[in-house]
Structures are given as structure tokens and as C-alpha cells.
Image: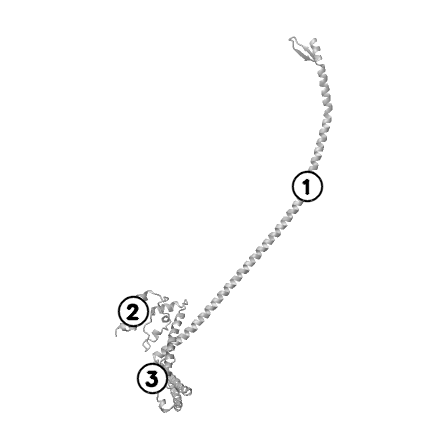
Amino acid sequence: MPDYFNPQGSIRKALHSPSRDRTRQQIKFSDERVCKSHLLSCCPHDILSGTRMDLGECMKVHDLALRADFEIASKQQVFFFELDAMDHLQSFIADCNRRTDIAKRRLADTQEEISAEVAAKAEKVHELNEEIGKLLAKAEQLGAEGNVEESQKVMDEVEQTRIRKREAEEIYRSSMPASSFQQQKLRVCEVCSAYLGLHDNDRRLADHFGGKLHLGFIEIRDKLDELKKVVSEMQEKRNQDRLKRREDRDKEERDKLKRRSRSREKRRQRSSSRDRKRKTRSKSREKHHHHRSRSDSHSQSLSHQRTRDRSKERSSKSKFSREKERPSRDQDHSRDKERRHKKCSYETPNGKSEERSAEEQKAGEI
């Protein structure tokens, strides 16, 4: 069939194109185009490859070199790729569970209805078939690994389980008509949604439970449970870290408030102390000013008193000096007056008149 009639073939060609190979060389493991499930070794496309439920190649990039880079880097840093891988596996398992429910409804519509009691007996036979198949698969795996003794022990358990199965089949046969018992009763495997027959032989059961498809689904489901646990622990740790950061922030805020209140209290104390000092200084200045004003007023009054005393003294001295000088002045005045009376006027030969004293006249006459 040509590839254009086969969408899966066209997808594989696109995935193996040279441009995709160049893209693989250029991107890093943290790129969105890289399959995070592949980095964690749990991609269903890898696990179920080669089975009848082969999903083909993943649409995202798968590269072992990127996985190696991630494993090295994850030792130093947490990338939280488990969240993406868990979502991927949850989606895949949800699809598988839907297919299982659809197959169960189809069997219920096609097979003859039986009573609840008979259905329970048939279910017991199916459970023993599954147990035998799982033990046979385990014994074959141990034998392939060279652990012969453990493999023989498992085979002994298989024989005991077969005896129990035959007993359960006898009980189931006794509760069913012979014609109905010969019909093949099918059930759906809860792990891989494959059909199982009530009368399947051991080889068929061993091939199913030890097959790659069934073991692959077991690996995927176990990996999903592991991822759920890891993610739950990571979320719890993240919540604890977030709570711790919040507590640290609250503590820091409380410390800031305490420091602010302390600083305000200190400023208040300093301001109150400054106010007290200012009041003290103002009081001292008022006292000093009052004392100074009193002293100034006293000194001023003293100076005024001294000034008045000096002025009185000066006035008394001036009065005394004036009284003392007054006789001398009167004497001088009387002498000047006598002197003027003694003077007389005479006429010079030139016709000028001159005043001369009596003594000068006497001297001239002589």
C-alpha cells in the first residue's frame, strides 16, 4: 500500500527527514519539542514498540544523547519534567481504560447472561488463570537469567495453582449446563485491555502475561504510580517551601515593624529628651534672664544713682566755683572801672586826641 494511504507511514517519513535530524542537533533537552517522557524512560511509544499496539514514533523528539544530558543536569538542578511525563502517561492510561470499558460492554452484549453466582465462579477461574500465566512468565524470565533454582520454585507454585484452578473449574462446571460450559467465556485484561479466554491453556496464558504488551502496560502503570508519588512529594515540598517563604516574609515584615516601632520609639525618646533639654535650657535662660534683668536693673539703678550723685556733685562744685569766682570778677570789674576813670583824653600835636592815664599825663608834662 502506498504511504499516502498510510498516515502512520507518512508520519514516520516526516520524523526521519533530514530537517528533523538537523533539529535534533540544534535543540537542547529543555526544549518544548523534546519528549519529557522519553527523557524519563517512560514514553509509551518506546515501551510498546514492536507489539500489536505499536503506537509508531512519537511526534516529539527522542534522542538518547539528550536523555544523557538531562540525567547529568538533573543531578544539580530540578527541572520538574515529571509533571509533563505524568500528564502524558495519564492521558495514555485513560485511553486504555476507555478501551477496556468498551470491550467489557461489547462482551456483555454478545455473551449469554449468567447469574451473579455463576459469574463469580467464572471470575475465580479467570483469576487463577492470570496467576498461572504470571508465574510461568516469571519462571521463564528467571530461567533466561540463569537463576535455575528460583525458576524451579516458581514452577512448583505453578503446579499448586493449577490444582486450585482445576477445583475452581469443577465448581464452575457444576453450576452451568454442559452446553453452556463448552462455550468460550471471554474477559478483558484490566492491564492491557486484551481478551482472555476462560479455557485458555497455560502456554497461551504465559504468552500473554509474559508478553511485551502486557509487561509494557505494567511498566507504564507502575511508572505512572511512581510519577504520581514523586509529583505529590514535589508539590508538598513546593508547598512547604512556599509556606516557609511566606513565614520568612511574615517574620521579616514583623521584624521590620518591630525595627520601625523601635526607631519611632527612639526618635520619640530623643525628641522628648530634646524637649526636656529645651525646656530645661529655656527655664535656665529665663532664670538667668530674670537674674540678669534684676542685676541689670539693680546696676542700672546704681548707675543712675551714681549719675545723679555725680551730677549733684558737679552742680555743687560748679556752684561753689561760681560763688568763689564771683568776688574776683567783681574785683576785676572795679579795677577796670577805676582804670577807665583814670584815663583821660588829650590832644596830640597832630590834632589827634588820645586817652592817657594820669600817670602818663604826669610823665608827659614833665
Vertical placement of residue 129 versus 11, above or below = below
Q: Can residue 142 be seen in this view?
A: no
Q: Label 1 amino acid?
A: Ser
Q: Position of residue 212 (x, y in %)?
A: 34, 78
Secondary element under disc 3, as helix, strand or loop, is helix
Q: Label 2 amino acid?
A: Ala
Q: How far apart are marks 3 and 1 (CA)?
A: 132 Å
Residue receiving disc 1: 297
Q: Position of residue 92 (x, y in %)?
A: 37, 74
Lower sequence index among marks 2 and 1:
2
What's the residue at 45%, 71% (across, down)? 233
Quarter where residue 303 is shown: top right
Which part of the image, by quadrant, shows the N terminus?
bottom left
Query: CB of mark 3 within 8 Å of CB of mark 2?
Result: no
Vertical placement of residue 255 versus 95, above or below = above
Residue receiving disc 2: 14
Residue receiving disc 3: 204
Lower sequence index among marks 3 and 1:
3
